[in-house]
């Protein structure tokens, strides 16, 4: 499989989308103690980019959806490069989850905070 | 994490949904040689259940969506039990992909055939 370090690459984003949804589903399953799943909202990924201080990787005037795509591309690229394992990512998320991740309208923010820690971890591994 | 061998369990289905989408995305990335992703349609999972001769696990009058859910629950259960690894599943799918998986309207059937081989493999491991 060939790819470049281009966080605007749509292929990396779509692979990253299924990777982060799987990581989130596993972390949520471990947090709740029962198998469960879900999709990570773009708004949570956009919050995570800010919190991980990776805003410099996002072109100006990129909307929430585009910021989410860039976060997903970073995650896919880092995973393909062997910078982190799925087990490590699940553990970072789970350790940063609060009860708010299960809250009907506080979950996006709470998930964004946990994803911010994951992106910070990944950013350090890749020296971003 | 606690769970039972209940293929009608919605939690197993939702975890299985993110697991099979990730496996599919990886297999498609390896098949095309570039990072890419996608979601597995319920209709492909319904075809796979038939082809793997696992119809006996589906209650009568279960619609296509419900058959897909049961396939996803089987996949999640088997993976949680350690019956297969993500790497093995990606390899089974990739080896059974044809060019039709990239075709605009033949892809659902072609993916169903490849997923049928994966479910057959999983069914043997679990003695279903």
Image (cartoon, coloured by chain):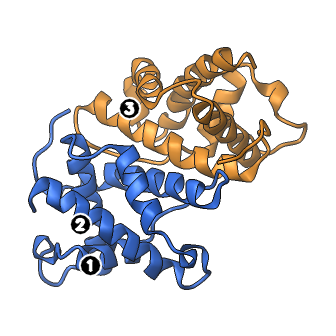
Chain colours: A orange, B blue
Q: Chain of mark 1?
A: B
Residue B120: numbered disc: 2
On-image quarter of the N terminus of chain B: top left
Q: Residue furthest front?
A: B95
Front-most of B13 and B122? B122
Looking at the image, is A72 positioned above or below residue B40?
A: above
In front: mark 2 or mark 3? 2
Q: Which residue is mark 3?
A: A27
Residue B51: numbered disc: 1
* Residue at x 53% of width, y 84% of height: B106
* Residue at x 70% of width, y 46% of height: A2
Q: CA distance from mark 1 to mark 3?
A: 32 Å
Q: Are marks 1 and 3 on the same chain?
A: no
* Mark 1 touches mark 2? (CB < 8 Å): yes
Front-most of A97 and A109? A97
Other-residue count near label 2 (Cα within 10 Å), few / some / many at <14 / 14–19 / ≥20: many
Q: Chain of mark 2?
A: B
């Amino acid at each position: 499989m060939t790819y470049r370090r281009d966080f605007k690459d749509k292929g990396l984003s779509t692979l990253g989308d299924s990777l982060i949804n799987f990581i989130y589903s596993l972390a949520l399953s471990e947090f709740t103690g029962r198998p469960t799943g879900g999709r990570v909202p773009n708004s949570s990924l956009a919050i995570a980019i800010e919190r991980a201080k990776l805003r410099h990787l996002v072109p100006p005037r990129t909307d929430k959806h585009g910021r989410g795509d860039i976060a997903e591309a970073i995650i896919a690229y880092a995973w393909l490069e062997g910078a982190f394992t799925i087990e490590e990512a699940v553990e970072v998320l789970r350790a940063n989850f609060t009860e708010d991740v299960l809250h009907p309208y506080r979950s996006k923010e709470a998930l964004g905070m946990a994803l911010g820690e994951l992106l910070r971890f990944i950013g350090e591994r890749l020296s971003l």
